[in-house]
Structure formats: structure tokens, C-alpha cells
Image (cartoon, rainbow, N blue to C red):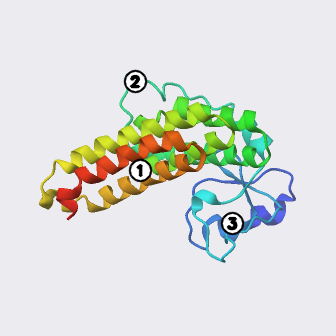
Amino acid sequence: MLDILANNNWERPIYFTGGASADEEYIWLKDYLQLDGLAFKFVPIRTPILDGRGRPKSVLEYGRIDTESMYEKVKQWDWKNSNSKDIYIDVETRKNGISFRNNLVRLAEQFILENNYAKAEEVLDMSIENMPIEDYDHYSLVLGYVDNYYLINKKEKAQKVAKTLVDIFQDRIEYYSGLSNYAAAHHGDDIEATLLMYNNVVATADEYDKEFANELKKGYVNSLKSLESIIE
């Protein structure tokens, strides 16, 4: 790999796929990556992997984004039957969906920063249409959709995502509330995570959409009450 770098002379693009947060991953070139769809392109532009406080970013946040370059690539993705209700989306497929969803959200957020709301909406819609929220799990990656849709003035779409998430969270809480204290203790982390995500949706709505947020708050309070017997 070092030989390729030494002799490439920028005549052909160099890409990395996968990787983790270890120092040696991406052969120590994490500060020079550009997210280009599902892979990282090596570019002579420094994008530090340390945040403003000097802490390493998550691997899901690596690299800069050239919106037009990445947009051209994601528009060519063939989703086949990814949104079909006639197939079972297995665990591995849901895991693989993390990269697709995360990278599309990052692209949309960059379009928002560039005030290109039309393309931001198109990318967000593409993600939800091809990976239905209720089928792909990993709901923490979907929380940002509510905020992003509000930011581009798509109130109805923000509300629709929020309602979908809330329905999922309420179903989970209903299940947990029916467990014995002993059984619920084994799901403590799941219960806490569900409540945190639920609270995030309510807080985001409260920032942009007070009337709608008030409706969500009532459901959140009722959900907390239903858990009182197992979290005392």
C-alpha cells in the first residue's frame, strides 16, 4: 500500500473501504479522506478526525464530503427489493444498512449546510423510501431525520418520521411494561436507550413545532407511567 502511495502520482484515485478507529487503519491517512458513497477516497485535503475538543470522531463521521461527487454516485445505487414487504430484512442486512443510512444522512446534512434544500430533501426521501424505518432497526440513526426535515421546512415529513419512531418506541415500552421486574432487569439498557431516543424526538419537535411536541409529550409521560412498576 505504501508503494502504491509512493508511485501513484495522483494518476488514479485511491479508495479505502471499511476500517475501524485503530491508528493504523486507512494506513494512518484518516485526516485525508473524502466520503464518496460507501467508500473513502484519498484526497490531498486535510479533514481532521479530531473534533474541536481534540477527541477522535466516530468512524461514522470520518472524511469530508464533496456533495456533487457523492450525489452522482448515490443516485446510481440500485436498491432492488430493499423496501419490499414480501421479504424478511435479516439482522446482517440491517447492520449493512447502517452505512447506507448514515452516509445518506451525512450527504443530506452537507446539502443543508450549502442551502441546497431540494437535494437534501431528495436524499432524505431516498433513504426512507428504500430503507423503511420500521424494517431496518438502528433507530438512533433515524433521529436526525426529524431535525433535518424541519431545517428544510418540510414540517409534514418531519412529523411523519417522528410519529413512526414514537409508534415503535411505544410498542417497545408496552412490551417492557408487561415484564416482571426480574425479566425487565435484563433489558435495562434497551429500556434506557428507548426512552432516550423517545425523549430526543420530543425535544427536537419542541424546538420547531410546539403544538405537535405537546402531543408527543403526553404520550411520553404516559409511557413513563407505564414503566413505573418495573423501574422503581
What crowding class fits label 2: few (fewer than 14 Cα within 10 Å), some (14-19), or many (20 or more)? few
Residue type pointed to by label 3: Lys
Q: Please indicate, yes or no, whether residue 99 appears anywhere in the rendered image.
A: no
Q: Residue 61 location in percent, x, y?
A: 63, 59
Q: Nearer the viewer, residue 105 or 152?
A: 152
Q: Residue furthest top?
A: 86
Q: Residue 38 location in percent, x, y?
A: 63, 46
Answer whether labels 2 and 1 touch (C-beta < 8 Å). Answer: no
Residue at left offset 56%, top offset 71%: 22
Residue type pointed to by label 1: Tyr
> Mark 3 or mark 1: which is in front?
1
Q: Nearer the viewer, residue 4 or 206?
A: 206
Q: Based on the displayed image, in which of its 4 quarters is residue 227 positioned? A: bottom left
Residue tagged 1: 198
Residue tagged 3: 30
Residue at left offset 87%, top offset 59%: 9
Q: Is residue 76 above or below residue 213?
A: above
- Find the distance from the CA under tag 3 to the CA under tag 1: 34 Å
Residue at left offset 86%, top offset 52%: 11
> Mark 2 or mark 1: which is in front?
1
The image quadrant where one finds the N terminus is: bottom right
